[in-house]
Amino acid sequence: MDSTARRDVLLTGWARGAAIFLVACCVVSVPVLRRLAAWSASVARLNDKIDNGLMSRLGQHETALNLIAALGEPFAVTLLCLTFVIAGLAARRIEVAALAAIAIPLAPGLTEYVLKPLFRTPAGATVFPSGHTTAAFAVATVLIVAMVGAHRSRLVALRILTVAAALIGAVVVAIAVVALDLHNFIEALGGAAVGVGAVLAVALFLNLPAPRRLLAALARKINRPQRQTTSSEFEPERAPR
């Protein structure tokens, strides 16, 4: 099947297989990371070593770190989500707009209202996984899925650069929240897993026939050309002679 016939599909071929594998890895890794952080002394030491290293090397750049970490705050994430939705509609890729509209709010919501209460510490703290990192990796994954599904071979280099920039941006947000001591390394890693897994799960859902038919019908309605009104429609009817 050619690319134009599959334009409404977010993930095809190897990308779909990779997404299924990554979702499974993310689902497994979140509880495993929480368990290891709580019960493994060696993991706890590694966690502390990474945290202390980042704080000692980057802690003096607090202003810059706060600006970077703000990219994972609800206001910035909402703006990015709206940007992706508008860009997807403008490019007539309603599947990308739908992915952004559903997955970007879903991932942080899953972290804040389900996973943090579920994995609260014995002291009652709700810090795992990191909400900032969840949001940053959710935004990055939406952009990566959009680039993977962009059927334009002449833009391969630009798409690769965009994917690299998205990944680097998400990683930098994770580093910033650890360096600011907002979260530790394991909490940031857990947030990354939730962000990636949630977006890819939504993308796989939107690949199913029923959601694709619904989105196709919505796209036809949105892209339907407006009926042009001619001046003759406003002319009064002439009486027969």
Image (tube, rainbow, N blue to C red):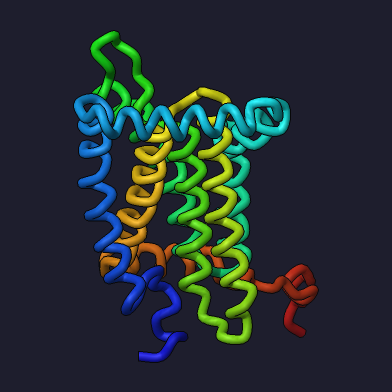
Q: Nearer the viewer, residue 53 or 133?
A: 53
Position of residue 115 measured from the top left corner of the image (x, y, whole percent): 29, 30
Tell me what residue is drawn at x 27 percent, y 32 percent.
Answer: 42
Where in the figure is residue 69, as x and y percent of width and height?
60, 33
When asked about the image quadrant of residue 3, the answer is bottom left
Residue drawn at 52 percent across, 69 percent down: 147
Q: Is residue 28 visible?
A: yes
User: Where is residue 217 shown, x and y percent of the image?
Assistant: 40, 67
* Residue drawn at the location 31% of the way across and 28% of the way down: 44
Q: Residue at x 31, y 68 (%)?
A: 18
Query: Up-down: is 56 above or below 104?
Result: above
* 94 and 116: which is toward the camera: 116
Q: Residue furthest bottom?
A: 2
Horizontal relation, residue 212 to residue 175: left or right: left
Can residue 109 be seen from the camera position used here? no
Closer to us: 153 or 102: 153
